[in-house]
Amino acid sequence: MWDDGKYVLFKSSKKAITSQELIGIWESWVNQYPSFCWKTAWARTICRGGKISLRRLGSRIELVGDDLFCTNPKILREGIEAGIANAVLIKLNQIGSVTETLDTIELAKRNNYRCFVSHRSGETEDTFISDRRWRRARVTLRPGSGCRSERVAKFNQFLRIEEQLGRAGAVCGTIGFWTLTAPAAILRPPR
């Protein structure tokens, strides 16, 4: 938690640490544990920590801006110019329209940022993110865990699409972060 210019580790030691110290902790975790993707903890107003973490960790893992960018092309452009992440979490209902969402994805692609299309907590059972043809955008889908009906609906749609695609569908990546190689959907994890 950000408090008075420091991060407070309120769930563990209660210690207040600087951005540099927090990045040091993350760096030790990357060195100890296989990691390839982290959502960044930086607020938009705290760009210095983002620059440092990108410099120290960005060649080894995806540093994904979620609330940092808010699926907003204007904010993403500022983040790209500031060098504070190397990937963006895309939430279709976060910015206001599908067109603005696609603009954000296009901006990310032009700047070599990876895109992760995500569900929203508490959203409906609409399966648009499962149905949308993401291949041209080269994005990874993140539908959430299969624990609530709106997420299960998306997984079920993936399975229906897989049945329709048959052998034309393929999975690339690791379990939990599946990248599209099929024309339409994320499919079952590798067996």
Image: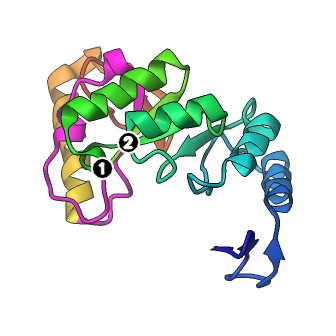
Q: Position of residue 100 (x, y in %)?
A: 27, 33
In this view of the protein, can residue 166 be seen by the observer?
Answer: yes
Where residue 107 sits: x, y (%)? 43, 23
Position of residue 145 relative to residue 166, above or below, is below
The kind of secondary structure the magenta stretch mainly shows is loop
Q: Residue at x 76, y 85 (%)?
A: 14
Mark closer to the chain start, 2 or 1:
2
Marks 2 and 1 in Cβ contact (< 8 Å): yes
Res. 191 in view:
no
Residue 121 counted in the magenta span = yes
> Where is the N terminus found, in terms of image quarters?
bottom right
Which residue is identified by label 1? 94
Residue 36, relative to residue 7: is it above or below? above
Identity, as a three-letter code, of the amino acid under mark 2:
Thr
Instruction: Please give the name of the residue rendered at 54% of the width and 27% of the height, measured from the top-left corner.
Output: 113
Whether residue 81 sits left or right of residue 161 in the image: it is right
Q: How many numbered markers are drawn? A: 2
User: Compared to 151, does 117 lie above or below?
Assistant: above
Q: Please provide percent x and percent y for residue 134.
A: 30, 24
Q: Nearer the viewer, residue 69 or 179?
A: 69
> Would residue 168 be found to the left or right of residue 173 on screen?
left
| Amino acid type assigned to the residue bearing label 1 in the image | Gln
Identify which residue is drawn at 66% across, 54% down: 46
User: How many C-alpha atoms fall within 10 Å of the one at disc 1: few (<14), some, or many (≥20)?
Assistant: some
Placement of 92 over or under 104, stated as above or below: below
Taking the magenta stretch, the answer to whether it contains residue 136 is yes
Residue 4: x and y in percent read 71, 76
The residue stretch that appears in magenta: 120-148
Say which residue appears at 54% left-offset and 35% top-offset. 78
Q: Which residue is mark 2?
A: 71
